[in-house]
């Protein structure tokens, strides 16, 4: 961690650090980065709640309660960087003809996604839901996970009725008993469990999906604001380390911002990624297998190269998992 970033992380909410310039950046003439903050998942809400700033960069946070609105703003070039799912990153890369790139990515968040059933239901395993309704979106990595579960249970997709809903409509369908199996992600998953007593009978580990959270930007922004993005990735990495060391404080700050209970925030990050990961040859190999599987499942409509999608030029700003700033 750079001294400048550490100062920034310790600064009070609303304050901007004014010392320790980062190479390529001038605190007297800061570069502006507009960051889209989703409600649904990830660490950007923590940066927003703490108003993390770095010398030489003015970070403007824009919060989006509705994820589709955020994607629309990002695709319209109204945002310099945001946080989406690994499938969404690949889809955006393809749709933009390669101009959307991943500059950083979390470690797996496999336990932040899972299959819920009602607390008083008889279902104890995925196979028990044969003939029942499963709620999820086929355009997400959940579909690949469901396909893996179907194969493991030696069943067929036709053995289930797939219902595609998202947001409040999905929650309502599950809570009113219209759906037997509900796939969702944290912090919504933690919130539903806490409020309804729903049981978690499978996670992304069982589904054999990593559930990564990539941080995406536009090629033009990367070319024009690379130093600012480098500093931002470092601040992101350091914020994750701070959150791991201060879960109660993180929950206190983030909960009122995104309208989830503090207990749901604590549960989310307790079982989530502990840091960013380096994008290296091993990562490329794993992600290419995943991208190929998504293509075969029909989630992706065209082939995507992991080496083209994920940039490794920001690796120097990625702190090792679980390591505090030194």
Image: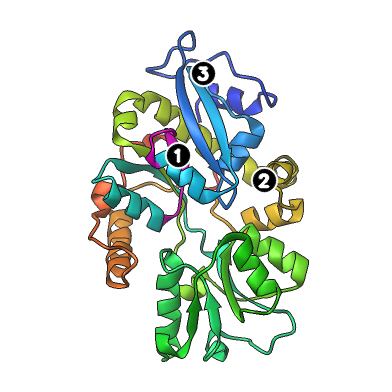
The residue to which callout 1 is attached is 73
Q: Position of residue 265 (x, y in %)?
A: 69, 52
Q: Identify the mark at residue 55; answer none if there is no mark.
A: 3
Image: magenta residue range: 75-86
Residue, x 48% and y 79% (percent of image)?
Answer: 162
Find out whether the residues at labels 1 and 2 contact each other: C-beta distance under 8 Å.
no
Residue, x 51% and y 31% (percent of image)?
Answer: 1
The quarter of the rendered structure image containing the C terminus is: top right
Q: Position of residue 196 (x, y in %)?
A: 75, 70
Camera-nearest residue between 191 and 229: 191
Find out whether the residues at labels 2 and 3 contact each other: C-beta distance under 8 Å.
no
Q: Identify the mark at residue 258; answer none if there is no mark.
A: 2
Q: Is residue 273 left or right of residue 281?
A: right
**Tag 3 or tag 1, which sits nearer the N-term?**
3
**Tag 2 or tag 1, which sits nearer the N-term?**
1
Give how far apart the Cα atoms at labels 1 and 2 are: 19 Å
Observer-side mark, 1 or 2, equals: 1
Q: Position of residue 52 (x, y in %)?
A: 59, 29
Q: Secondary structure at mark 2?
A: helix
Near mark 1 (Cα within 10 A), the count class, few <14, some 14-19 or many ≥20, is some
Q: Is 108 drawn above or below residue 27 in the view shown?
A: below
Camera-nearest residue between 7 and 153: 153
């Amino acid at each position: 961690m750079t001294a400048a970033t550490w100062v920034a992380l310790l600064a009070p909410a609303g304050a901007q650090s004014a010392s320790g310039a980062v190479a390529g950046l001038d605190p007297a003439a800061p570069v502006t980065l507009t960051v889209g903050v989703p409600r649904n998942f990830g660490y950007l809400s923590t940066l927003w709640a703490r108003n993390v700033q770095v010398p030489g960069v003015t970070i403007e946070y824009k919060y989006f309660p509705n994820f589709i609105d955020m994607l629309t703003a990002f695709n319209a070039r109204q945002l310099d960087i945001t946080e989406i799912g690994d499938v969404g990153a690949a889809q955006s890369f393809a749709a933009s003809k390669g101009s959307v790139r991943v500059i950083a990515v979390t470690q797996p968040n496999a336990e932040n996604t899972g299959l819920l059933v009602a607390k008083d239901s008889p279902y104890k395993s995925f196979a028990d839901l044969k003939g029942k309704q499963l709620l999820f979106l086929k355009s997400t990595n959940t579909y690949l996970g469901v396909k893996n579960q179907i194969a493991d249970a030696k069943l067929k997709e036709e053995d289930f009725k797939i219902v595609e809903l998202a947001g409040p409509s999905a929650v309502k369908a599950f809570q009113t008993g219209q759906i037997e199996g509900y796939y969702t992600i944290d912090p919504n998953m933690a919130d539903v469990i806490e409020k309804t007593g729903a049981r978690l009978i499978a996670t992304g580990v069982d589904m054999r999906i990593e559930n990564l959270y990539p941080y995406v930007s536009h090629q033009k922004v990367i070319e024009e604001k690379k130093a600012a993005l480098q500093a931002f990735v470092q601040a992101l990495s350091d914020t994750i380390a701070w959150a791991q060391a201060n879960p109660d404080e993180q929950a206190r700050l983030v909960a009122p911002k995104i309208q989830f209970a503090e207990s749901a925030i604590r549960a989310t990050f307790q079982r989530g990624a502990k840091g960013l990961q380096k994008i290296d040859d091993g990562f490329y190999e794993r992600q290419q297998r995943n991208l190929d599987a998504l293509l075969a499942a029909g989630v992706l409509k065209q082939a995507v190269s992991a080496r083209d999608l994920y940039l490794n030029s920001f690796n120097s700003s990625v702190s090792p998992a679980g390591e505090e700033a030194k």
